[in-house]
Image (spheres, rainbow, N blue to C red):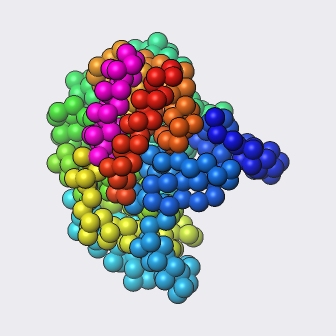
Amino acid sequence: MNNFTESKKLLDRASKVLAGGVSSEFRKYNHPHAIFYKEGKGSRLIDVDGNEYLDFTLSQGPLILGHSHPRVLEAVNAYSDKGQLYAGQHIQEVLLAEKICELIPSAELIRFCLDGSEAVQTAFRVARAKTGKNKFLRFEGHYHGWLDNVAWGISTPSVEALGDRAEPTAHVWSQGVSPESRDEFIILPWNDLELLKETVKKHHHEIAAIITEPVMCNNGCIAPKAGFLEGIRSLCDEYSIAFILDEVITGFRLGLGGAQTHYQVTPDLSIFAKAMGSGYPISAIVGKTSWMDCISNSQVIHAGTMNSSNPTIAASLATITVLEEEQPYERMFYLGKKLMKGIEEAAATYNQNLKVFGLGPMFVTLFTDLDELVDYRDTLQSDKAKLGKFISTLQDHGIRVIGRGLWYISAVHTEADIDQAIIAVNEVLSEM
Ligand code: PLP
């Protein structure tokens, strides 16, 4: 095992001044404890003890161009030289908005925010204002941020605890969440169009929005069944409901046009964050004018002191420009699929029920006897303890993967990186 002496010392010190020693819940769950890093370059990360990792977490997704991409850093530095935040408008946010409108099919008007959680709440506000209805319909296992009304149905002890498919029990993720926030939504298992149709037929008079991740990436990595997203689109049209596509993970990851281009379905509102900003705090709610005009005319208030600061806008413009120039997507799909295949072959060699699900640019590894995943109820049947051991042993072999088994491929991962990861997976499985 690597030496973590300096990380441990810093964690002890941090725990006296940072709650839990960290700045985000998910950073606690590292191996053997929260780790402190000192440098990231390309596909590599180095911790304070000098351990080097080939990074497939990409900081939970944002680093589509890897760590410290020179074009991003140059743009951030150059634009920050002209100031940080004007409490007023500036040219680069117009350039960025024009670029996003050009690339994203559903984008006609945009507002920039700081993160995905906040942009999701803005979308709910728009949907309520435009429809005059109050609830949103969401799906089990889908993550839409950490705020109260979405902190349900994402952390469940067992499949049994979810109860009846037609009227699931939504468990709350955290203490301190307002119990009234449970009244804001209807929850259903994902990928079940018939059940969705029945539910919407019954409750459409109170549903302002249906929100979904296009690919369920937060509990498994599950593609929508053929016709499912299109089914949501028609229901929303039929019953005057806002279709909100949460592209926080898929945006700029599945392609420049996001999942909506990949799956050829056009939502009313969509949320972008993570990969659009290469690690800088920027997100966007984008949508058709017919929805977003309620923000334009101030019927719906959206605000934020820190919105569209110079560094965040410069980072996003540079990231999207590099992605447009380099068109890395075919390669990211190729490398991701190569790695998925290598992991599957290793699992067969060592007779492990390690399965790989996903599209390539992102995929998940789970220990399960199921050959196909359809929804959260399937993901919940995998062996979490075994996955934890696999991920932490991989980390000891210099490969860093998100704890729930999610792997992200960046534009800067190389064929040699993929080969290194496959060798490590073989070594780890041989030890398990
Ligand atoms: N939506 C999805 C699909 C996400 O994966 C996340 C975060 O992982 C969010 C929303 C919340 O975004 P943020 O963490 O930027 O608030």
Q: Residue at x 39, y 19 (%)?
A: 350
The question of residue 357 being in magenta is answered with yes
User: Can the viewer see residue 78?
Assistant: yes
Q: Position of residue 100 (x, y in %)?
A: 29, 66
The question of residue 45 being in magenta is answered with no
Observer-nearest of 247 and 379:
379
Q: Position of residue 288 (x, y in %)?
A: 26, 60
Observer-nearest of 383 and 117:
383
Q: Residue at x 23, y 68 (%)?
A: 102
Question: In this image, 314 relative to 27: left or right?
Answer: left
On the rendered image, what quadrant is the N terminus found in?
top right
Magenta-tinted stretch: 335-363
Observer-nearest of 270 and 424:
424
Q: Residue at x 22, y 31 (%)?
A: 225
Q: Residue at x 59, y 41 (%)?
A: 26
User: Can the viewer see residue 148?
Assistant: no
The quarter holding residue 355 reads top left
Q: Position of residue 74 (x, y in %)?
A: 46, 77
Observer-nearest of 245 and 313:
313
Question: In this image, 322 relative to 175: left or right?
Answer: left
